[in-house]
Amino acid sequence: MKKIVFYLLILVSSLSKNFKKELISMLVKVKNMLKTETRESKRMLEIYFNYANGKYNKNHKEDIVWANNQLKDVFKTFGVGALLLLPFAPITLPFLVKLADKLGVSILPDSYNDDL
């Protein structure tokens, strides 16, 4: 994921007259996205750990649903990471993201969609 973000940053920033401002802005967005994913993944693990130890009951169903959705986001991140191993990833990944959007499927985690 880091490579694609880097290449997209360079592409977008090189098209802009304010290269430095655009680059800093994009890097701040990436930092915030990664911080959000880390925080949410920690919370997900806490929920699963507590559930496995029997500390959750039927009243905490929404927490389990949230943790399951976060786990889906983690798998999406792994999938995007696997796509980065393909040849010409800086070209193919944006194409696949756009194609998935047209088909109504999200292949990027929610935190990436929120901040972009």
Image (spheres, grey):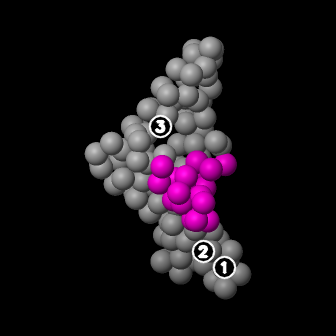
14 vs 116, left or right, is left
The kind of residue tagged 2 is Ile
Identity, as a three-letter code, of the amino acid under mark 3: Val
The number of callouts visible is: 3
Callout 2: SS: helix
Tell me the distance, in whole angstroms, between the alpha carbons under discs 1 and 2. 5 Å
Quadrant containing the C terminus is: top right
Q: What's the distance in space between the residues labelled 3 and 2, CA to CA? A: 31 Å
Residue under the image location 48 percent in, 49 percent down: 95
Who's the residue at 51% across and 66% down the image?
72
Residue occupied by mark 2: 64
What residue is pinned by disc 1? Answer: 61
Quarter of the image where one finds residue 18 = top right
Q: Secondary structure at mark 1?
A: helix
Residue 101: image location, x then y, percent: 59, 58
> Do the CB atoms of the residues marked 1 and 2 lie less than 8 Å apart?
yes
Asked if residue 110 is among those painted magenta in the image, a careful observer would answer yes
Please indicate, yes or no, whether residue 106 appears anywhere in the rendered image. Answer: no
Cα–Cα gap, marks 1 and 3: 35 Å
- Residue 34, given in percent of the width and then of the height, sits at 53, 43
Residue 57 in sight: yes
Question: What's the mark number on residue 5?
Answer: 3
Residue lying furthest bottom: 58
Question: Which quarter shows the N terminus?
Answer: top left
| Above or below: residue 104 compared with residue 82 | below
What is the span of residues highlighted in magenta in the rendered image?
Answer: 95-114
**Circles 1 and 3 in contact, beta carbons < 8 Å:** no
Residue drawn 44% across the image and 63% down it: 75
Q: Earlier in the sequence, mark 1 or mark 3?
A: 3
